[in-house]
Amino acid sequence: MLAMDKVYSIRRLFYEQGKSISDIIAETGHDRKTIVKYLDMTNFN
């Protein structure tokens, strides 16, 4: 599991900055499955 600051960063890039998943992969170096997992996540407890 990623640290919450990394999760928030991924979500911010996608939802607030409008970056594509491919752009986020290039920027963070994380796998596509990881990015999608955290974008789909709704419960952070």
Image (tube, grey):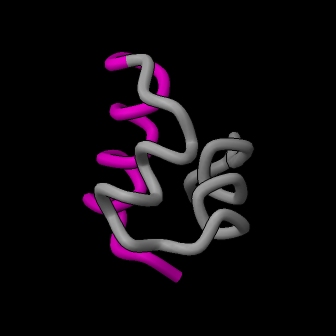
Give the percent coordinates (x, y) of residue 11.
45, 39
Q: Which residue: 47% across, 72% down?
A: 30
Q: Is residue 21 left or right of residue 19?
A: right
- In the displayed structure, would residue 25 be above or below residue 12? below
Dominant secondary structure, magenta:
helix
- Is 15 or 32 nearer to us in this picture? 32
Q: Where is residue 4 in the image (x, y as percent from the top left)?
A: 35, 63
Q: Residue at x 43, y 76 (%)?
A: 2
Quadrant containing the C terminus is bottom right
Residue at the bottom extreme?
1
Looking at the image, is 32 positioned above or below residue 11? below
Residue visible at 65% across and 63% down? 32
**Percent coordinates x, y for residue 23 in the rendering:** 43, 43
Q: Is 41 inside the magenta-drawn segment?
A: no
Question: Where 1 falls versus 20 (above or below)?
Answer: below
Query: How many discs appear?
Result: 0
| Start-end of magenta stretch | 1-17
The quarter of the picture where residue 28 lies is: bottom left
Which of the 4 image quarters holds residue 40? top right
Q: Quadrant of residue 35?
A: bottom right
Above or below residue 11? Residue 27 is: below
Question: How far from the left and from the top, in percent, is residue 19?
Answer: 42, 28
Kindly identify the residue that appears in the image at 69 percent across and 40 percent down: 42
Indicate left or right for 3 with 5 as reference: right
